[in-house]
Amino acid sequence: MKTVQISLNSIDKVKSFVNDLTKFDTDFDLISGRYVIDAKSIMGIFSLDLSKPIDLNIHESPDMDKIMETLAPYIIE
């Protein structure tokens, strides 16, 4: 499993993030405080505090390089 910090600070960013994740047959979890939600759930994402960075857990996948490339616009360095 790989964990990265992401920022989803606008509605358009959330929509494009979910659309990007649904292209992959991999499990993604968002962790904010004590809450863990499915990162492919747009309703779940809107239940989080989006003003702060969120941890994204990416479960093992043979497409990890492609996933990281796709997620680059959301990742906080």
Image: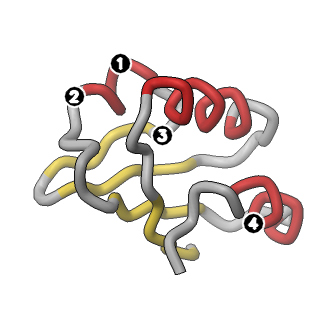
Which one is nearer the viewer's eye here, 25 or 73? Answer: 73
Q: Quickly name the residue at label 4.
A: 68
Give the SS element for disc 4.
Answer: helix
Q: Are marks 1 and 3 in contact (CB under 8 Å)?
A: no
Of pointers 2 and 4, the one earlier in the residue sequence: 2
> Distance from label 4 to label 1 (Cα)?
23 Å
> Distance from label 2 to label 1 (Cα)?
7 Å
Of pointers 4 and 3, the one earlier in the residue sequence: 3
Q: What numbered label is drawn on residue 58? A: none
Three-letter code for the amino acid on which mark 2 is drawn:
Ser
Q: Are marks 2 and 4 in contact (CB under 8 Å)?
A: no
- The image position of residue 67, as x and y in percent, is 78, 58
The crowd level at tag 4 (other Cα within 10 Å; few <14, some 14-19, many 20+) is some
Q: Quadrant of the N terminus?
A: bottom right
> Distance from label 2 to label 4 (Cα)?
24 Å
Left or right: 71 in relation to 62: left
> Distance from label 1 to label 3 (Cα)?
10 Å
Q: Residue at x 24, y 48 (%)?
A: 51
User: Residue 8's image quarter?
Assistant: top left
